[in-house]
Amino acid sequence: MPARVDGQDLAIWRAASGQTHVWGDRCPHRGMRLSRGFVRGETLACIYHGWQYGNDGGCTQIPAHPNLVPPKTICATTYACAEYSGVIWVALQTTTQVCRSFPGQAAVRSLAIKASAEKVMEYFSGADTGVVCVGGTNDIALALQPIDATHCTAHALASVSADRKEVSRWLESQRRSIELDLA
Amino acid sequence: MILYDYVLSASCYKVRLMAALLDIPITLKAVNFHPEKQHKSPEMLRLNAAGTLPVLVDGDVILVQSADMLRHLVTPKNAGWLGDNPAQTEKWLDFASRLNASLGMARLHDVLMFDADIDQVRCDGVAQLRQLEEWLTEQRFDGMTFLTGAAPTIADIACFPNAALAEDGGVSLDPYPSIRLWMRAIRSLPGFIEMPGIHRLHELSPAPARPE
C-alpha cells in the first residue's frame, strides 16, 4: 500500500511470512510506483513490467529476461521499519530511537486530515512527539504521520475494550473541527 | 441481450462486470463515444432519446439507466445480489449516481476533455470518498466486507467503477484503506473482469512458469 511520510513516497508491503517492508515507492526500472504492484510469497512485483524484488530490496527476477540473474545494483530503496500494536513505524534516517509501544491499546483506523501534523498536535495541545495521548474512557492515542505542509494521517489506537465505531465517529468529528479551524 | 458499449465508460463497465459475475452472456456493440460521438447519432438516438451510454436491449426491453440494467441482470436464482434490505441497496445505488457526477465527471474532464468545474467535482468526489471510507470502516468492524452486508450486491458493483477510477480524474485513493480493502474484495470475486484502468489481482493466479 502507498504512504507518504515527510514528503517521501513509500510502498508498504507484507510478505507471506508476515514480515513488513517499507520501501521507496519507485521501481528502479521505469519509476513506476511499487505500491501499485503485487505480492507473491516473499517478493513484491512491479505492476508495469513484473520485475520482482525480494526481502532485501534486491531484484530477483526480470520476466522479459527469464534466464538473467539480475545484477545486485538493481535494488529498491529500503527503510528500517517495525510494527507495534498494529502500527508500522518507519525511519527515513538511521536512528537509535525506540518505537513507541501501546500496551492495552489496539489500532482502530487511519484517518487522512487536511492539516499538517504540527497543526493537529497544536489542536490537541500535545507535545511535539508525533503521538497525541487523548485518553478518555476509550483511552485514545493518535500516532501522527506527517505527510506535507497541509496533510497528515492520524493512526488512532484505543483501549482494546473500546467501541470502535464510537472511536471512529469521534475521529470524524475531530477532523471536521480541525479542518474548519483552518478554513 | 445486447449492450451498446464504450470500453472506457465506467457505467458500461458496471454492466459488463455484473454480467460477467453472474455468468450471463451479453453481446457487446461498440459505440464510438469519443471522438466520434456516435451515441448522438440518429440510430442511437432512436434507441435512446437521451443520447447516453450504456443502452441494454433485451428483446422488447430497452434500458438506458445502468442501475436498471444491474437489476435486470439479476435473476431469481441470483436474488442475493439485490441485497436483504432494498432501502439500503437503493441508497447506495443513489450514491453511485452521485459518484458518477463527481469522480466520473472529473475523469471525463481529464481523460476525454469534457467541460466541467473540475475543482468542484473533485471536491465533491473527495467528500463522497470520505463518506464511503467511514461507512466501509464501520462495516469492517461488524465483520462486513461489502456496502450492505457480508455478500456483494448490485450496489457494490454500481459504486465500484467510479471509485476505482478516481485517480484518472486526479483524485487520489491513497487516504482510504477501507475503500482499498473493499475494492480488493470486489476484484477477488469469481468471474471478475478488468477494464482499462482497473486491472485484476495478479497475485490470485499462480506465477507463470519460468521457461527451461
Image (cartoon, rainbow, N blue to C red):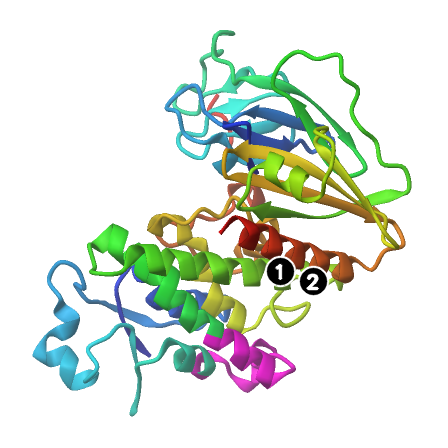
Dividing the picture into quadrants, the one containing residue B45 is bottom left
Residue toward you, A6 or A27? A6
* Label 2: how many Cα within 10 Å (few below 14, some 14–19, many 20+): some
Pinpoint the chain carrying mark 2: B
Pinpoint the chain carrying mark 1: B
Confirm whether circles 2 and 1 share one chain.
yes
Examine the rendering and report whether any part of residue B192 can be seen.
no
Q: Amino acid at mark 2?
A: Glu
A22 left or right of A67 in image: right
SS label for mark 1 = helix
Disc 2 to disc 1, C-alpha distance: 6 Å
Question: Residue sitting at 69 percent across and 33 percent down?
Answer: A16
Find the magenta span and give its range.
Answer: B72-94
The residue at the far bottom in this view is B60
Which residue is disc 1 drawn over? B134
Which residue is disc 2 drawn over? B138
Dividing the picture into quadrants, the one containing residue A132 is top right
Q: Can you give x and y, in whole percent of width and height, for residue A93 in the image?
A: 62, 14
Q: Can you give x and y, in whole percent of width and height, for residue B114 in the image?
A: 21, 59
Residue A166 against residue A99 in the figure, above or below: below
Say whether residue B89 is magenta: yes
* Label 1: how many Cα within 10 Å (few below 14, some 14–19, many 20+): many
Question: Residue sitting at 45 percent across and 30 percent down?
Answer: A50
